[in-house]
Amino acid sequence: MTALIGVILGTLVGYAIYRWPEGRFRETMIALSDVTTNFAGAPLAFAFVVILGMNGVVTQFILKYFNYKLYPDFSIYSFSGLVFAYVYFQLPLMVLLVLPAFSGIKKDWQESAQGMGANTFQFWWYVGLPILMPSMIAGLTLLFANAFGAYATAYTLVQSKLSLVTLQIGYMIAGEVRQDVGIGMAMAVLSLIIMSLGILIYQLAMQRAQRWSKR
């Protein structure tokens, strides 16, 4: 889910940054995407607790000035909260992946399409989207692998509330209640296979996407 959300929102944000004129703002947004995509793990989880926890800054701000209680309708310690935290570092990663793909779309192609009577929607549907699709598929697989392998953020926020694969491996290997090293190692091997397939699909898709950047 976070991979799909990251691909959709990241592509839209990446397009907005791509259309922005060259300058300090555009460079700042790219640098910000680079920083936020590397800010994950336990520090990110604690940051969200401080901001959106039961006594978090934003939670208390909304309660004080809008008289609305986020809890229990929303909780950073729930599935929706974990999705929100994951999207935080998934979205900027997709922005960094899709920006080179937008650079591969030449302005001459859009002008030629308009000269042949195509409108903006038709250009993006028949020309732009097929060019972006390999990069979007590559981004989807990479974001899936990124979310699939995340551990510290999920462990800090939800612990045993959600049955994520990485959390189950940790409980099987180092837990005190359901410890079973054999099952944990088997799950780790299967996870490695899944991650390897995701990276392979990513590399194949990126090779296809790079063809357009060379034209």
Image (cartoon, rainbow, N blue to C red):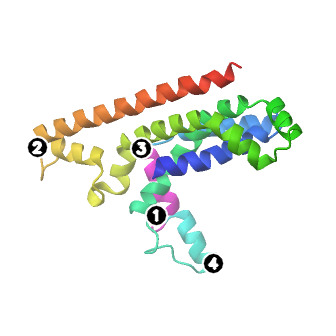
**Which residue position is annotated with label 3?**
147
Q: CA distance from mark 1 to mark 3?
A: 22 Å
Which comes before the other along the chain, label 1 or label 4? 1
Q: Is residue 153 above or below residue 50?
A: above
Q: Main secondary structure of the magenta part?
A: helix
Decide if residue 116 is on the left or right side of residue 187: right
From the viewer's side, name the closer residue of 184 and 66: 184
**Which residue position is annotated with label 4?**
66
Figure label count: 4
Check if mark 2's residue and mark 1's residue have beta carbons within 8 Å. Answer: no
Q: What amino acid is found at the position of numbered circle 2 in the picture?
A: Asp
Q: Residue at x 64, y 76 (%)?
A: 65
Which comes before the other along the chain, label 4 or label 2? 4
When asked about the image quadrant of residue 49, the answer is bottom left
Q: Residue at x 24, y 36 (%)?
A: 190
Q: Give the magenta-colored segment's residue range.
A: 42-55
